[in-house]
Structure formats: structure tokens, C-alpha cells
Image (tube, helix red, strand yellow):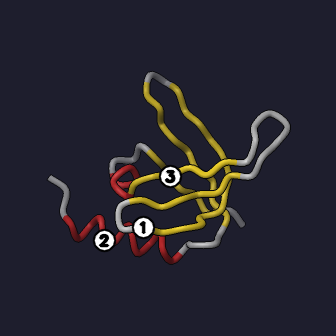
């Protein structure tokens, strides 16, 4: 069982990085990993949004992730300089 306190710690850590560029690594299972870069745009009680700019191959999009995804390491956030 996950402690509420640890989810709150993750929520606060993500809120402190709002507006900053991050690299997102998402484990989709069965050796599939998606990597993209974006900016943390909005924070909600259960999820946060990352705006991912477009490229030649993909249009711009907004992705949502939950704080529990970070705790279970299905999603990794890496700060970009």
C-alpha cells in the first residue's frame, strides 16, 4: 500500500518544477519505452500536464501523467538544463 505522504512529496516536487523543461521517459511495457521532452504546464491534485512541442513527425501535444506513475517508476522525469 502506498502512503499518502509519499504521493504528497512527489506532488510538491513536481509543483516546484512547474514551467521547467523536462525529459520524460515512459515505460510502456514489453521493452517499449517512449522518450520525449516538454514543459510541465499544469498541476492538478492527481495528475500533471506536460506540453510536448511538435516536430516533423509529430504535432504538438499535451500529455498527462499521475504522481503514482512516478512512484512506481512507470514514468521518469529528468530535468533539462
Residue 51 appears left or right of 70: right
Q: Residues within 10 Å of mark 2 (few under 14, many from 20)?
A: some
Q: Position of residue 74 (x, y in %)?
A: 41, 43
Q: Residues within 10 Å of mark 3 (few under 14, many from 20)?
A: few
Residue under label 1, please give it: 44
Gap between marks 3 and 1, in whole Å?
10 Å
Q: Tag on residue 64?
A: 3
Residue under label 2, please give it: 8
Q: Position of residue 2 (x, y in %)?
A: 19, 56
Residue 54 appears left or right of 52: right
Q: The residue tagged with tag 3: helix, strand or loop?
A: strand
Viewer-side label of 3, 2: 3
Nearer the observer, 77 or 65: 65
* Residue farthest to the top, as pictured: 30
Residue 19 appears left or right of 57: left
Q: Position of residue 42 (x, y in %)?
A: 54, 68
**Quadrant in which residue 68 is drawn:** bottom left
**Quadrant in which residue 38 is drawn:** bottom right
Identity of the residue drawn at 51% across and 41% down: 26
Amino acid at each position: 500500500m502506498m502512503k499518502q505522504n509519499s504521493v504528497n512529496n512527489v506532488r510538491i516536487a513536481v509543483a516546484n518544477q512547474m514551467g521547467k523543461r523536462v525529459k520524460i521517459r515512459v515505460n510502456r511495457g514489453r521493452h517499449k519505452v517512449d522518450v520525449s521532452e516538454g514543459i510541465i504546464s499544469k498541476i492538478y491534485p492527481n495528475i500533471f500536464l506536460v506540453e510536448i512541442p511538435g516536430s516533423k513527425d509529430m504535432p504538438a501535444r499535451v500529455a498527462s501523467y499521475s504522481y503514482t506513475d512516478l512512484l512506481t517508476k512507470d514514468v521518469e522525469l529528468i530535468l533539462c538544463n
